[in-house]
Amino acid sequence: MNFLKKLATAAAVSSLVLGASIVQADSKEPIIIPTHNWTSQITMAYVIGGIFESIGDNVSYVPADSQAVYESVRNGDITIANEIWQSTFGKSFNNALDAGGIIDVGNHAAVTKEEWWYPAYVGKLCPGLPSWKALNDCSALFATAGSGGKGRYLDGPMDWHGQETLDRIKALNMNFTAKFAGSSGAIWAELASAKKDNRAVVVFNWSPNFTDAGTGGSFVEFPPYTEGCKIADGGDGKCGSPPAGWLKKAAYYQMPKKWPTAYKIFNNISFTKGQIGNMAALVDVDGLSHQEAAKKWLADNEAVWKRWL
Ligand code: TMO
């Protein structure tokens, strides 16, 4: 090898070494992503996992309780949280932030609402809606077998917000009982069954969701939310949920060191209301599996996610 070639080789090697010391490669250990019990979160988990895989990282998915997950991220058993809804999970998330080990990775563009909801035709059965007082005056319309003559509200699974609904019914002295659905699917099934019979129904629902499109519906309007108004936060419980809640992302504090490129991408990721509603609709309206929906979303939206790389 002549001198010039040697020099060129040495320069190439040292610039490689130098490059490597500037940008540490991501670990090949899997980034652990949780899956919960509502559609957009699960589909988005696979979308984000697909984005990490596109840069050569490894990912694995674990089913996780939607309140306990922040403790798991804090101690590194799970690497990220991709949909932290203010009304249902704000308290558990803030507790984990206070304890340390979890990073607030910022908000999605979408703002959120999680509240009692009724399909559009129910507005005709109970004029005066969306006021909660009007709903209460119509409570008999919402009675079911087993609700003892009171209106029946179908709440989400208990891990979403625990006693909050029962607290609110009591605080506002409403003539309603609550039933906890076993899954989000049970809520959609009840909506379909009620619609067939033109029967009054009120359920927990949220936005962004697939119900933002289609025949529509409305959230019940409760007394306005103020910080600390919930019983669990020390308030009197006579309030609805935040009208424009945040939707956050979070990560294990070691993620920036261990997977610096994926962490940078995760910082950039921000989904809109339309995108999240679409992730839900691909499954709950179009019938795809969560993985198929994520694949389709990634294929249809390369222009969106490639600019986050
Ligand atoms: C957490 N959720 C979106 C079901 O309200």
Image: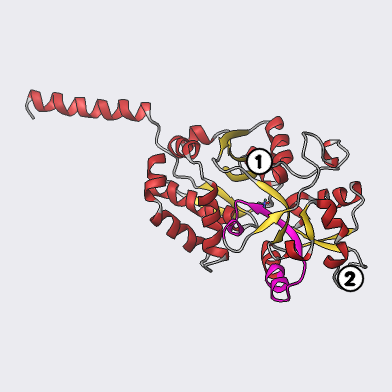
Q: How many marks?
A: 2
Q: Find numbered disc 2 in the image and state the secondary structure of the residue it sits on.
A: loop
Residue 25 image offset from top left, x and y in percent: 39, 36
Q: Which mark is residue 146?
A: 2
Q: Earlier in the sequence, mark 1 or mark 2?
A: 2
Residue at 69% x, 52% y is 65
Q: Quadrant of residue 235?
A: top right
Q: Quadrant of residue 176?
A: bottom right
Residue at 61% x, 59% y is 211
Q: Quadrant of residue 224?
A: top right
CA–CA distance between discs 1 and 2? 35 Å
Under mark 1, the amino acid is Ala
Residue 265 image offset from top left, x and y in percent: 45, 39
Q: Nearer the viewer, mark 1 or mark 2?
A: 1
Of all residues, the one furthest to the left in this rendering is 2
Q: Is residue 138 visible in this depiction of the protein?
A: yes
Magenta highlight range: 190-213
